[in-house]
Image (cartoon, rainbow, N blue to C red):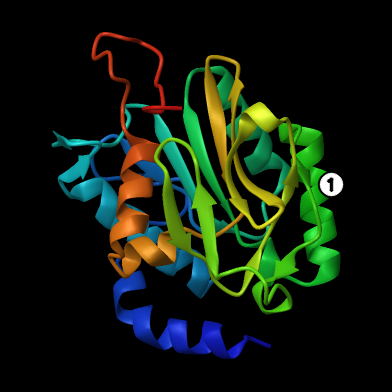
Amino acid sequence: MPTRREFLTGLAIASLAARLPAANRAAPRRAEVWLEDHCLSQESALGFRRLLKRDTVTNGSTQSSIASSSLIIVPGIRRMSPARGNDLLQRMHDGTWVVLESGVGFSSMAEAKHQADLFKRIFGLKLLPAVKVAQCPAVATYVEYTKPVCRLARTFEAITPIDCEPTEVIARFGRHSVCARKRVGRGGLVFLGSMLGPGLFAEEREALAIGAALVAPSANPVSTLPQLRGI
């Protein structure tokens, strides 16, 4: 049964989501958005697609095209299959950067456990049990990004913490490491354990600054390897 948030979100975005491409279909201008058939993923996908289409100011410089030439965004993922996971892994080894936004904080415990096992096996990511934001009254409802820009981004009902190397952490929620960046082959993976896409959809200023920095192309325009600016 959908949560109250999912029901209201579904009503708000139904007409827009109908225009989204199916999974694996290329989004406009050099990036792909692989979404799932549920409202949180669709809402987040709309946010990332808006980001990719707009001119954005990051660190004082205007980027007229902020999408990397080799970028896949997977918004609000809950039920990644082994086949899709292995496909993403191969794309990373070939030079693609993947921004993988987790939605498992909104899944059942059994579904979350299944996804955690798959993420560890395929990507080497150790997902920890979801944390409900309401259970952390001493922590403000913001995720603190330290890379690629220092910003506070609003979080939502739940986060998916991770256990990773300190050098890989790019954002925290209280004592929890919640976002990370790691190289994989010639490309790499950015894991978002707190959903950023809904903030992009709402055009929140801090979310836009973080999102723009995460998907920015290499500072060196002749480089053949996609990079994430400032990380």
Q: Position of residue 186 (x, y in %)?
A: 53, 14
Residue linked to disc 1: 117
Residue density around tag 1, few if under 14, some if 14–19, many if 20 or more, within 10 Å: some
Find residue 207 and report its image quarter.
Answer: bottom left
Q: Secondary structure at mark 1?
A: helix
Quarter of the rendering occupied by the N terminus: bottom right
Find residue 119 and report its image quarter.
Answer: top right
203 left or right of 210 in image: left
Question: Which amino acid does the dot numbered 1 rest on?
Answer: Asp
Q: Position of residue 15 (x, y in %)?
A: 30, 80
Q: Nearer the viewer, residue 193 or 119?
A: 193
Q: Looking at the image, which residue is at 39% across and 65% down?
A: 199
Q: Position of residue 160 (x, y in %)?
A: 69, 57
Q: Looking at the image, which residue is at 74% across and 35% down?
A: 164
Q: Looking at the image, which residue is at 32% across and 21% down?
A: 218
Q: Looking at the image, which residue is at 65% across and 60% down?
A: 78
The residue most toward the front is: 138
Number of marks = 1
Would residue 37 be visible to someone looking at this image?
A: no
Find residue 28 and report its image quarter.
Answer: top left
Q: Nearer the viewer, residue 218 or 98?
A: 218
Answer above or below: position of 47 versus 72: below
Q: Position of residue 72 (x, y in %)?
A: 45, 39
Would residue 180 be visible to someone looking at this image?
A: yes
Answer above or below: position of 20 versus 123: below
